[in-house]
Amino acid sequence: MASEEESAVKEPLDLIRLSLDERIYVKLRSERELRGKLHAYDQHLNMILGDVEEVVTTVEIDDETYEEIVRTTKRTVPFLFVRGDGVILVSPPLRTA
Amino acid sequence: MKIKLTSASYSVRSIKFSFCSNLLAKPRKPSLFLGRGIEIILFFSYFKDLVGREVTVELKNDLAIRGTLHSVDQYLNIKLENTRVVDQDKYPHMLSVRNCFIRGSVVRYVQLPPDGVDIELLHDATRREARGG
């Protein structure tokens, strides 16, 4: 699985290169998160992800009680191109439980 | 008098300059590209390979359009044919639209066919581009 590249990790984009063909977590604008397998990316952070799960988080404020209801909507897409201008951060998947 | 002379020579010089620059006006890449090395067009090539396949383009305004990929350009502007809006009841204003041009900057996602393209090819191309950048 580890690619035998001797090229040094110089730029932040090189760090993403280390995650090619690995599962990653991507935070997007508009309170969206993606978890999927990174197949391709470029310097704009346009990406192609496989087996993607998208989580959209919305906060609704009840009119009467003023309590915040946090809702998450999930959906899975087998193969997805993500445009780079929506990407905030890219990371290895967070360890939950 | 000195001032007059100077201004005259300045204007002559400026005419000369513009004449020269017209002669030399070959289409030249702006220095931005030269700084980065090879122009990187990984996804443009990928989408060109995908022409003729059915894709779903999700825009930043949550509109999702399903159609056949007709063409793409360097800005990843997309032309779709035989389009249908995914949630027709929610977005009735596109009912009669069958072909559309989508500006690349308004795209959020493009849902690709699962047998989209050779994954290994993508990995190799990405590694090559990343090394170049």
Image (cartoon, coloured by chain):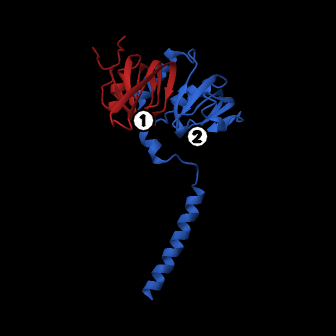
Chain colours: A red, B blue
* x, y percent for residue A13: 36, 30
Q: Is residue A67 above or below residue B10?
A: above
Secondary element at tag 1: loop
Locate residue B22: give its quadrant: bottom right
With A87 as the anchor, is B66 left or right in this view?
A: right
Please tell me whether mark 2 sits on a helix, a strand or a loop. Answer: loop
- Please state the horizontal and vertical placement of residue A22, each as a whole percent of the image: 38, 16
Residue A67 pos. (x, y %): 32, 34
Residue B31 relative to residue B53: left or right? left
User: Which chain is disc 2 placed on?
Assistant: B
Q: Determine the residue positioned at 44% across, 84% down.
A: B3
Relative to the observer, which residue lies in front, B102 or B39? B102
Q: Are marks 1 and 2 in contact (CB under 8 Å)?
A: no
Q: Nearer the viewer, residue A15 or B102?
A: B102
- Evaluate whether label 1 is on the same chain as label 2: no
Indicate whether B65 appears above or below B1. Answer: above
Q: Amino acid at mark 1?
A: Ser
The C terminus of chain B is located in which quarter? top left
Residue farthest to the front, as pictured? A64
User: Label 2 amino acid?
Assistant: Arg
Q: Classify mark 2: residues with Cα within 10 Å, few (<14), some (14-19) or many (20+).
A: few
Q: Which residue is mark 1?
A: A30
Which is more toward the observer, A92 or A35? A35
Q: Residues within 10 Å of mark 1 (few under 14, many from 20)?
A: few
Q: Which residue is denoted by mark 2 in the rendering? A: B103
Q: Residue at x 47, y 20 (%)?
A: A75
| Picture residue at 47% right of the left edge, 83% below the top | B5
Mark 1 and mark 2: Cα distance apart in space: 20 Å
